[in-house]
Amino acid sequence: MSQSQMKNILSCPNLPSLPAIAVQLLELTGDPNVAMSDIAKLVQQDQALAVKVLKTVNSSFYGLSSPCGSIDRAMGYLGLNTVKSLVLGFCLVETTKGAGDDGFDLEAHWRRAIVGATGARVLAKAVGGVDAEEAFTAALFQDLGMLATFAAMKTEYAQTISGIPHRAVCQSEIDEMGFDHTQVGYELASKWKLPTDICEAIRCHHNTDSVLPEHQALAQVVSLGATICDAMDETASKGAIRKIERLTRDWYAKAAPDVGDLLEEVAEASRSMAKSLEQEIGELPDPAMLMAQANEQGFEHQLMVEREAHIDGLTRVANRKRFDAELARVFGEFQSDGLGFGVLFFDADKFKSVNDTYGHGAGDAVLIDLARRTSKVIGERGIVCRYGGEEFAVIVPGATLDECAKIAEEVRLKICNTPFDLSGIEGAPDELAVTVSIGVSSTDAQQGSQVSNGDQLVAQADECVYAAKNDGRNNVKVWGWFEKGKAQDSQEKQSMPAPASVPASVPGPTLEPVIPSSHKGADSLGRILFVEDDALAATLVISLIKRRSKVDIQWVKSGTKACMLLESGKFAGDQSLNLVLCDFSLPGCNGHEVLRVAKRTPGISDVPFFMLTGSTDTDMRDESHRLGATKFIGKDEFCANVNKWLDEVFGAMAAA
């Protein structure tokens, strides 16, 4: 049925027919020995067509430095394919006159055709390997099958495609008719004796995977032209822009153009070509606005992906990857400004017996509730992570050893005081008593030597877990507390289980963290004060910066703390700043207040100040520059061209 219906369409007397001059042009250009003068004579036989072609050649679309007065000169300036593409374009316009009756949106058709064709042409010139004018022609004809199908089926076809996004039109056509417009367009283009490359691009512009290798380059450019058209539609632009970025990166690697620049050029060229072809295509949206919207979504998506990549799938607390990143971050803060931190390490006592006796469903339920109870105790004081298996770790920034010990005891009591509910697990008891053994260490638990890295504290806390298990389980062991307890008999320690010393080889305690006298290493580019309240956004930006060069970064979450640090005189001598990177929306003082403090503080006032914000408010941007900001970077801009802004950051630091 579908084949017979397509045959009916292709034999329909209402089908668009290619004007005679276009047929003759295709025959002439198919001869490799044809003389340019013969083609010029053919085009000049139709004076109206020749005038249109020359008017377009002399338009801003081609940007000639001097006017061109004849067809043969136009071919000399721009090549045979340019004149051929224009003649075929004007002939296609001629075939579509009257096609807008009975429900076919001709303006939308020409919008897609012109934006897609100019997009394919601009892209072909940027990436190379494809004749730009052939790409223009192929993309202009890519939806020829829709015109033909409508001419044959009228309202029946109009209903098939009504309200369907163009990217989904093929499926709707197949569902209703058993074939789609790419097949009809290919058959009609072949009947018109269009070049094989163009016929194949028409057939495969919705599915470039099916094209033969020798036609792939043109088909890909034409397909991207269609996606560029989607990108110029506000309702579909975000997904289309991401698709263009992905495909150009996959297909063209280093030759891939900047998508924002691409859309800007296509929008301008499309307006010019629509005017030359005397076709209405409606208003095109501002490409800069479309990119800003897409990049805002991209930044949010990037953060969402980053968040998901750092979350344990079972317990929904942070995973080992996030733990490692946070440990590196807090250790960096400890090195740069002496802000100590603690680590709690624990696992469920005799957990293997839970799995062995009641099954992994019961074990999973215990782990989920362990994570939930621990998170409730820790709250905003730290970050709870599933370290691996039944092991959990907690990082507590800014906490002393005593404070970490108290928190550990809160966690232990929260877990052991209330049985775990396993009533929903088949084969398990309704309730199960669960206990944990917790080890604690912190930066102020060391003696005599500096903490060399965060893993040192993890190893100490882990040894304390073994000590806790050896002492009967369900207790807290703290690195070095036995010796410290002799000197300090605090009320808090009295409420704790009697602590046992860790092995004799363990170094004794010291309450004073050892901070390096110089935080700026010999191979470090310098120091950045980074003010950002979103931990994941901060982790993302810090990792991007550190991936490029060794930089000491002091990250603070609060505008108020940033102001206090700037005014404290801390950043002097070896600890001097090379750059401030500051979010605008912050707890306490906002970014402008931080900027004011920086500009009035001796020794800081000349330090480059970059305002990094999710806002696109031009008044905020203007005020930032008025107050002395070196740069105002939207997070969407930052994500759109990370390398550009990292170059700006490192350039400013080097100059400082």
Image (cartoon, rainbow, N blue to C red):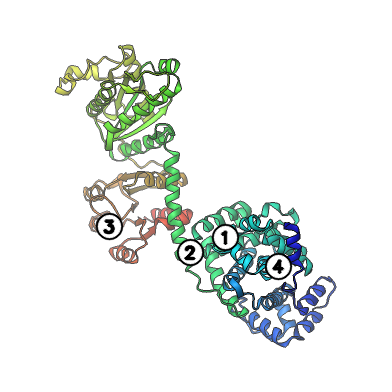
Labels 2 and 1: the sequence-earlier one: 2
Q: Residue at x 25, y 33 (%)?
A: 399
The residue wearing badge 2 is: 234
User: Mark 2 or mark 4, which is nearer to you?
Assistant: 2
Q: Residue at x 67, y 62 (%)?
A: 181
Q: Is residue 548 left or right of residue 140?
A: left
User: Mark 4 or mark 1, which is nearer to you?
Assistant: 4
Residue 518 drawn above or below residue 38:
above
Question: In the image, what residue type sits under mark 3?
Answer: Leu
280 vs 413, nearest the viewer: 280
The residue wearing badge 4 is: 134
Look at the image and tell me whether residue 197 can be seen. no
Rounded to the nearest whole Å, what is the CA distance between mark 1 and mark 3? 36 Å
* Corner quadrant of residue 417: top left
Labels 4 and 1: the sequence-earlier one: 4
Q: Position of residue 279 (x, y in %)?
A: 59, 78
Question: In the image, what residue type sits under mark 4?
Answer: Glu
Rounded to the nearest whole Å, what is the CA distance between mark 4 and mark 3? 54 Å
Q: Position of residue 129 (x, y in %)?
A: 69, 60
The residue wearing badge 1 is: 257
Q: Is residue 337 left or right of residue 155?
A: left
- Tell me the element at label 4: helix
Question: In the image, what residue type sits under mark 1?
Answer: Pro
User: Local crowd at mark 1 within 10 Å, few (<14), some, or many (≥20)?
Assistant: some
C-beta proximity under 8 Å, tags 2 and 4 = no
Rounded to the nearest whole Å, what is the CA distance between mark 4 and mark 1? 20 Å
- Tell me the element at label 3: helix
The residue wearing badge 3 is: 595
User: Mark 2 or mark 1, which is nearer to you?
Assistant: 2
